[in-house]
Amino acid sequence: MNTRSNTRGARKAKGLASTSVTLAIVGGLIVAFSVNALAATSVGLGTADSFGVLAGSGITNTGPTTINGDIGTFPTTIITGLGSMTINGTNHAGDAVTQGAKNDLITAYNAAAGQASNQTISADLGGTTLVSGVYTSATSLGLTGTLTLNAAGNPNAAFIFQAGSTLTTAAGSRVALINGAQACNVFWQIGSSATLGTTTDFKGNILAMTSITLNNGAEVEGRVLARDGAVTLDTNRVIRPTCNNSSGGTPVAEIVYAANIGPLAQGLVCPWGGQFDGFGLCRGSGANSLMNPSPTPTPSATPATSPSATPTATVLTTTAPTATPAATPAVTPTRRPVVLTQILLKPQGGVETGRYGQR
């Protein structure tokens, strides 16, 4: 195997982190690997992780709201509009679990605030694309339109936003995640309060010092966590995210259909979770049945029987012996012929950056 490396320098567009690209030649095929130099680290939430909504001075809801995750509020334990809420989790109200989660929220808030900034950002993030990093505004953050977060193929890429005061989104604004970015790794550390405009499609965990308001129809894939203030809801959906973590974001090349590359394929990961063997065949869960389908057995020959001999007056009737059945030929399993037409590059747990086929 021949390898060569090409390291790209820092790219200016909105604080792009540097990316190392390695090209490996496998059986005449060029396979590219890329590793992002992450400038931000994900924030541990402790026992607050299970919560979709967590408040300090109560939760108020209007209209049908769905929370996928636990809810709780402390020290003010009042929750109004509970009857129109669908909670796919536990209402901890102000119990010991909520109190522990509030303590962990403070720790998480301080951890997010303490990460070193990579770039100072403008007041409005609409129309921008950002890669993993820590982005800081000494005052307010706003969003009008679409903010795109690009993980560059690394599912562990973290995005930290630090605002000195407020976060406000305009109606219909959205946060888009591309190339493996995950809402669980996006954190909004807000120095006072956060307000999401109507029908905002928001991604990430909001950690606000004071209050959080979700206006009518706003949706959050993330968590709504207010340290001291209230959480106000109005016909919303809050979906607590889970991370699809890979082994440290190490990129893995997946050659889906392999032929004529022999031992060079060993160690590469199959799309079904197994590995290629020394013959370039994919072994593992579900792979053998696809690459080596069960052969159709040849039916056994029908034994031929000679008719009975005609008896004579002086000889007893005899029957000719039955013919020996033809031997059933041995069935040799055949491998399904495949030709590699393209390759799929996919960081483990990430998104594909190429396509593959078979003919």
Image (tube, grey):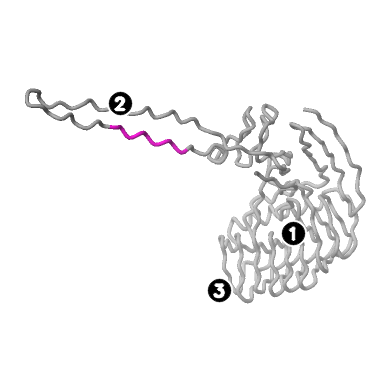
Mark 2 or mark 3: whose residue is earlier in sequence: 3
Residue 159 rendering spot, x and y as whole percentages: 79, 52
Q: Depth check: 320 or 184 in front?
A: 320
- Neighbor class of circle 1 (other Cα within 10 Å; few <14, some 14-19, many 20+) is many
SS class, disc 2: loop
> Does residue 111 appear in this view?
no
Magenta range is 296-304
Where residue 7 is drawn, which disc sits there?
A: none
Residue drawn at x 71%, y 53% as measured from the top left: 182
* Residue occupying the far left of the picture: 313
SS class, disc 3: helix
Q: Main secondary structure of the magenta part?
A: loop
The type of residue carrying mark 1 is Leu
The type of residue carrying mark 2 is Thr
Where residue 324 is drawn, which disc sits there?
A: 2
Residue drawn at x 74%, y 67% as measured from the top left: 211
Tag count in the figure? 3
Where residue 207 is drawn, which disc sits there?
A: 1
Q: Depth check: 304 or 233 in front?
A: 304
Taking 47 as reference, is 39 left or right? right
Residue 300: in magenta span: yes
Q: Quadrant of the C terminus?
A: top right
Is residue 234 positioned above or below 97 on the image? below
* Residue occupying the far front of the picture: 313
Mark 2 or mark 1: whose residue is earlier in sequence: 1
Residue drawn at x 81%, y 30% as measured from the top left: 3
* Residue occupying the far top of the picture: 314
CA gap, disc 1 and disc 3: 26 Å
The residue tagged 3 is 83
State the image quarter where residue 346 is shown.
top right
SS class, disc 1: strand
